[in-house]
Image (cartoon, rainbow, N blue to C red):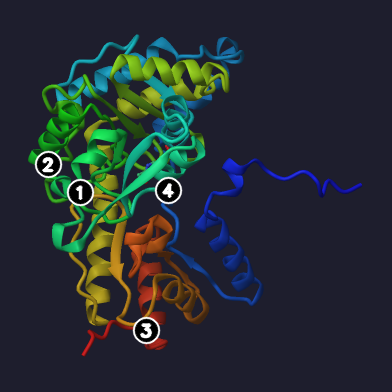
Amino acid sequence: MTLSWITPADRVKMLPPYVFARLDELKARAREQGLDLIDLGMGNPDGPTPQPVVDAAIEALKNPANHGYPPFEGTASFRRAITQWYHRRYDVELDSESEALPLLGSKEGLTHLAIAFINPGDLVLVPSPAYPAHFRGPLIAGGKVHSLMLKPENDWLIDLGAIPDSIAQQAKIMYFNYPSNPTAATAPREFFEDVVAFAHKHEILLVHDLCYAELAFDGYQPTSLLEIPGAKEISVEFHTLSKTYNMAGWRVGFVVGNRHVIQGLRTLKTNLDYGIFAALQSAAETALQLPDVYLHEVQNRYRTRRDFLIQGLAELGWTVPKPRATMYLWVPCPPGIGSTDFALSVLQQTGVVVTPGNAFGAAGEGYVRISLIADCDRLGEALRRLKQANICYLPAK
Ligand SMILES: *Cc1c(COP(=O)(O)O)cnc(C)c1O
């Protein structure tokens, strides 16, 4: 029996195809053709989870107290570890009862926040390019997304002055993310101050994604939105353990900030899930308490790869600015070819997978994102193949 009469709801049908799913198909086809793929497409860290975290998980698994449903709002002890981490890291005071909520990864929370707060037709400000959940969440909720087009000449920062007053007045929520995926841009503290003033003036809820809080190099320390005076009144900030601690498969993230917003998200989630397996919350506490030497190792690993790849790309004609944070290079396509065509041609000719910039929104056209998720040997092999296929950057004449 077919179910030809049943179709997904409009909120699912109207979503643009998830580029990573499409890329997966193409990768599968390339593999069938016998290509040895070098996958620098997704932001999926290649390193193992730190041993102390794995050990803590094994211990916690053996404790039957962890085997039942976890508390909806996360374990008290993980929430305290989160607020202690915030205090240590940013000198920001948070109430672990009401101002911190563990999440099944931050993607889950970013999307559910939209469902909890956006009514059909509500206006949401979202940068372009952006991490897909920042615009897909609002679209699923029925919101109207107003794209804030980011530009290289503005260092990929949001130009608040370019937002028309009528739009700012209508907007209910603004998503943003620095250090940024995909552009790898960082924002100075003054930018965060300007955003907070803008949000107060126009009564906009700020949703900041600080996914790359710890993946920063050369002494740079990313700013937390909550460090800015007055921010907690109008904002929440999302974090994940996926990237810093190589825990993408564990699905652990959290949100902190305004208690009313956290309460709204918690109410929705109470109807959807039971949160993170308690044994994993216990291991996640260990991650947040790891000594700084662990962070330095991770940072060094990505910094070494960054420098190696930038140097190699320079030999092929590319001038890529050195990002001070994230695990990405944001690389212009050679003149005259679009993002999708360039990524496809690189894949077909060399087996190297990069992500077309337009996957992150229209303003990502003309770029590809390269993830630093392979060691220098593999990156070197990728560069050799590019050279052999004569793929290089020739400036427009
Ligand atoms: C990777 C990434 C996430 C997803 O994190 P999870 O906690 O694994 O869901 C969220 N935001 C940005 C900007 C990311 O790059």
Mark 3 to mark 1: distance in Å?
A: 32 Å
Task: Characterize the local packing of mark 2: few (<14), some (14-19) or many (20 or more) Cα atoms within 10 angstroms.
Answer: some
Q: Earlier in the sequence, mark 1 or mark 2?
A: 1
Total numbered labels: 4
Q: In the rendered image, which residue does mark 2 sit on?
A: 191
Kind of residue indicated by mark 3: Ile
Q: Earlier in the sequence, mark 4 or mark 2?
A: 4
Kind of residue indicated by mark 2: Phe
Q: In the rendered image, which residue does mark 4 sit on?
A: 132
Q: Looking at the rendering, which quadrant does residue 32 occupy? A: bottom right
Mark 3 to mark 4: distance in Å?
A: 28 Å
Kind of residue indicated by mark 1: Ile
Q: Is residue 305 left or right of residue 157?
A: right
- Residue 170 vertical placement versus 330 (above, below): above
- Residue 237 vertical placement versus 17 (above, below): above
Q: In the rendered image, which residue does mark 1 sit on?
A: 158
Is label 1 in contact with label 2 (beta carbons under 8 Å)? yes
Q: Looking at the rendering, which quadrant does residue 192 occupy? A: top left
Q: Closer to the observer: label 1 or label 2?
A: 1
* Quadrant placement of the C terminus: bottom left
Mark 1 to mark 2: distance in Å?
A: 9 Å
Residue 28 x/y as whole percent? 62, 66
Residue at (31, 12) in percent of width and height: 96
Kind of residue indicated by mark 4: Pro
Is label 3 in contact with label 1 (beta carbons under 8 Å)? no
Q: In the rendered image, which residue does mark 3 sit on?
A: 391
Q: Closer to the observer: label 3 or label 1?
A: 1
Task: Kindly state the secondary structure of the residue where label 2 is placed.
Answer: helix
Q: Earlier in the sequence, mark 3 or mark 2?
A: 2
Task: Characterize the local packing of mark 3: few (<14), some (14-19) or many (20 or more) Cα atoms within 10 angstroms.
Answer: some
